[in-house]
Amino acid sequence: MDPSLYPRMAEVEDAHWWFASRRAIVDHILDRLNLPGDASILEPGCGTGGNFAMLARRGQLFALDADESAVGFARARGTAQVERGALPDQIPFGERRFDLVLMTDVLEHLDDEAGALRVLRARLRPSGWLLMTVPAMAWLWSAHDITHHHRRRYRANELRSLVSGAGFDVTYLSYYNFMLFPIIAGARIWQRLQQHDRVAANGRHHLTMPSPAMNSILQRIFSSERHLIGRARVPLGVSLIVVARAPAHTDSAAVLTPSTSAN
């Protein structure tokens, strides 16, 4: 991500409808994973630490980011051991293995996405969990992707193959952020027509906070998806979410069992 965006992210991440709603959906899924009571948790690409409060309730939290300013903001929260690092070959914390790896919109930034996933699988304990979100659908590419230094957006079958190819057992995969999909898709298309991608590339695109009323409305709509995501699969949306497990010798933990078929 453009380093100039981290101070702004630190200001808005706790309250902005998009970040808050994504946390609500992830939190709801984590409740169903039957993690150990004092789980060891890794968040690569933690940014300014907006997920820390949610994760720290579940155990001992370790996090890393490639950007020094992001590490500073994340450390200031005081809820995780945060180090500078990068995927796939700069993971700190010695030989520690984890019960859960959470990556929210990180994979799309990486040059070696497959290598990163293989390394993370090796750092998970037997039957450990990977929960990951990524942006979906290449045709939604917009100024947001350019400013945030995205390299790609994903299709469901593409993401499944990538995660499975790294040695994970995919237990749940679905599009999400589907309720606002028509509005967001329309806005992205309009931006392209107005050449906002060029504006963003010149560094003039910033994270914005809507009015309190609009922020509340958008959060209610988006976060309401938590009652479906994790239980059923949705055929389209702005983003994708995947839950996967590392190989296990014995496997007694619960798995997500969606109620409908998927793409």
Image: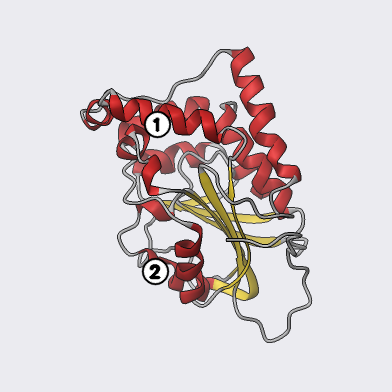
Asked whether, in this view, residue 1 is left or right of residue 249, the answer is left
Q: In the rendered image, which quarter is residue 253 located in? A: bottom right
**Marks 1 and 2 close (CB-CB < 8 Å):** no
Report whether 65 appears left or right of 58. left
Query: Which amino acid type is marked by label 1?
Result: Arg
Against 88, residue 213 (above or below) is above
Q: Residues within 10 Å of mark 1 (few under 14, many from 20)?
A: many
- Across and down, in percent, residue 89 comes to 35, 67
Residue visible at 20% across and 28% down?
A: 202
Foreground residue among 222 and 32: 222
Q: Which residue is mark 1?
A: 188
Q: Percent from the top left, x then y, of residue 3?
A: 31, 36
User: Which residue is at the front of the view, 162 or 180?
Assistant: 180
Any part of residue 164 in sight:
yes
Q: Is residue 207 shown above or below 161?
A: above
Instruction: Give the label, 1 or 2, closer to the camera.
Output: 1
Residue at the limit of the structure toward the bottom, as seen here: 249
Q: Residue at x 53, y 32 (%)?
A: 182
What is the secondary structure assignment of the residue under circle 1? helix
Residue 87 vertical position relative to residue 3 in the rendered view, above or below: below
- Spatial CA span between label 1 and label 2: 28 Å
Of the numbered discs 1 and 2, the one sitting upstream in the chain is 2
Q: Horizontal and vertical percent for residue 99? A: 64, 67
Question: Depth check: 174 or 111 in front?
Answer: 174
* Amino acid at pointer 2: Ala
Q: Which mark is residue 110?
A: none
User: Residue at (46%, 36%) from the top-left corner?
Assistant: 73
Percent position (x, y) of residue 104? 52, 49
Query: What residue is disc 2 on?
Result: 114
